[in-house]
Image: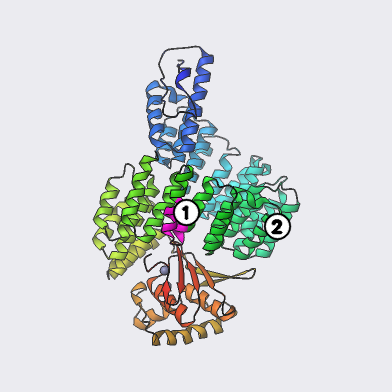
Amino acid sequence: MLLQIPKKSLQPSSNPNLIPNISQNPSNPINFDQNYRNLCLLLQSLSSSRSLPKGQQLHAHVIKSGVQKVTLLSNHLINFYSKCQRPNDARQVFDEIPHKFSTSWSSVISSFAQNELPNLSLEFFRRMIENGIRPDDHIFPSATKSCAILSSIGSGRSIHSLTVKTGFDSDVFVGSSLVDMYAKCGEIHDARRVFDEMPERNVVSWSGMIYGYAQLGEDEEALRLFKLALIADLDVNDFTFSSVIRVCGHLTLLELGSQVHCLCVKTSFDSSSFVGSSLISLYSKCGVFDEADRVFEEMPSRNLGAWNSMLIACAQHGHTQKAFELFRRMGVIGVQPNFITFLCVLSGCSHAGLVKEGEFYFGQMHEHGIEPGAQHYACMVDLLGRAGKLPEAVGFIESMPMEPTESVWGALLTGCRIHGDTETATFAAKRLFELGTVSTGMHMLLSNAYAAAGKFEEAARARKMMRDRGLKKETGLSWVEEGNRVHTFASGDLSHPLTKEIYKKLKDLGEEMERAGYIADTTFVLHDLDGEEKQRAIKYHSERLAIAFGLVAFAPERPIRVMKNLRVCGDCHTAIKFVSKCAARTIVLRDNNRFHRFEAGACSCGDYW
Ligand code: ZN
Ligand code: ZN
């Protein structure tokens, strides 16, 4: 049956308020084609603006008309829900497609990969193969991306051999995604082999390789490769620069990043707003807020990405008032905020414990026609939870129009840990585990929430549950950059060439700190150790070793910048305040949540983190 979609009612990007009036009357196929195309365009425009309610309305109309059975339209619906972070809705649309072509599989597999559901993405990839559908140059990259997220090198290799069998290994997109996957799984030699054999390379393959070397600390090779990319076959553009700077930012390679910045200036690419945004996030991630601010203020033109990057920088560094000021400036010159903008402002409120302001900006989202997503709710729950308003936080979760995600429950658990509320923690844990697969971080949060309230048996049980599920705790690592080298430390690490000097420094400092009034707080140590052992374990947490290395190896006036992959514990936080005072040194520590700038015995976070 042909369906008529009146031409006039569809105005793709110009007015997404209009819902097409799809009637059941047959009409001529040309008209149908045109209107159908318009409907797809409208969905695309709603996807890019992530207008969930309008899209849902449109979807309802589409269902009523029966037109959703057309595969292409369903694909657009899947992409729309994927962009709006509704992978379950995307899946439902997929399930209802009677004849699934490879494009439908491609849409749903990439929807899972993009929404951090790598297991589901791979499961659907397997199902697709079982259904005899041939993967294509869109599906392979989604599958390899999922392997990279899971660090699942076994699945990655199987997919690689499948690309060889199907002849897709010479495709530039597929090849690049393989390079990226091997590099992210730490298999640099395999990455290099694929890279060297590629008939044609693009930005993703070059960036993947550079990332791989940089991640292994082989910065010279990373930089060498980047220079090759500049002079070789790669058409270097602002996107190349911006990706390389992002690599540096991601790995907090300040010196390498600054060198690339110089190159940008020489080649005049520094005026691009893409490059500018990456530079802002590089400097922010490396703890040099002033430099990020300078880049931002000197930009000749700023796109929304640049504003958002600067807002993230403010949130991470605790410059909340500045973030509010930027938001005001955006309003004055008419820059429309998007959902990321609000995420930045809300996380700023949450870092500073500003409940009223948070509620205000959350309300502002509706004014700007932006539907809050799960991440915005997580931010608000975090804000309320940290401020000790746990019942309000629970009420807030209950008011969510969508299923609360892991990060929402995680935010509630953080509040429970800070305020020692094991009852709410148990409730959150129960709901959390109903979601099915739960990450290591959540088990640790739960365990920490119990331990902080002195319930060690429950804490142990949460950790055992984690082990039973085959999850491993992420190893706490801290690293510090010196010249073009990165020095990485694990807790109690004895592998560094300067180990003797580092431990001696810690011992000497420890005595001085105790004289200044420092008392080790071992409630943060969760192992079932006795008192003295607990003190020992906490004394050598990775960030302390990294700081001691800085004290031993750096010139006396140079600030020490340490990066850590996990959250800093309360005792280390206190200890570092004492170090900054006793050693008269500025220490910048970035943990997985924010920046701490320690100076003269105090921290920029005001002990609120
Ligand atoms: Zn610690
Ligand atoms: Zn702090």
Q: Residue drawn at (65%, 64%), measured in percent from left and top?
A: 219
- Residue 579 versus residue 274 in the image, above or below: below
Report the predominant secondary structure element of the magenta stretch. Answer: helix
- Residue 311's mark? 1
Look at the image and tell me in which quarter the N terminus lies. top left
Q: Nearer the viewer, residue 234 or 583?
A: 583
- Residue 3 versus residue 90 in the image, above or below: above
Q: Residue drawn at (47%, 47%), measured in percent from left and top?
A: 330
Amino acid type of disc 2?
Answer: Leu
Amino acid type of disc 1?
Answer: Leu
Look at the image and tell me in which quarter the C terminus lies. bottom left
Q: Residue drawn at (37%, 30%), measured in percent from left and top?
A: 57
Q: Residues within 10 Å of mark 2 (few under 14, many from 20)?
A: some
Q: Residue 601 in the image: x percent, y percent?
A: 42, 77
Q: Nearer the viewer, residue 450 or 561?
A: 561
Magenta span has 318? Answer: yes
Q: Residue 2 in the image: x percent, y percent?
A: 46, 15
Residue under label 2, please give it: 225
Q: Are marks 1 and 2 in contact (CB under 8 Å)?
A: no
> What is the distance, in whole Å, between disc 1 and disc 2 at their CAs?
32 Å
Res 71 seen here: no
Q: Is mark 2 within 8 Å of ligand 1?
A: no
Quadrant of the rendered image holding ligand 2: bottom left
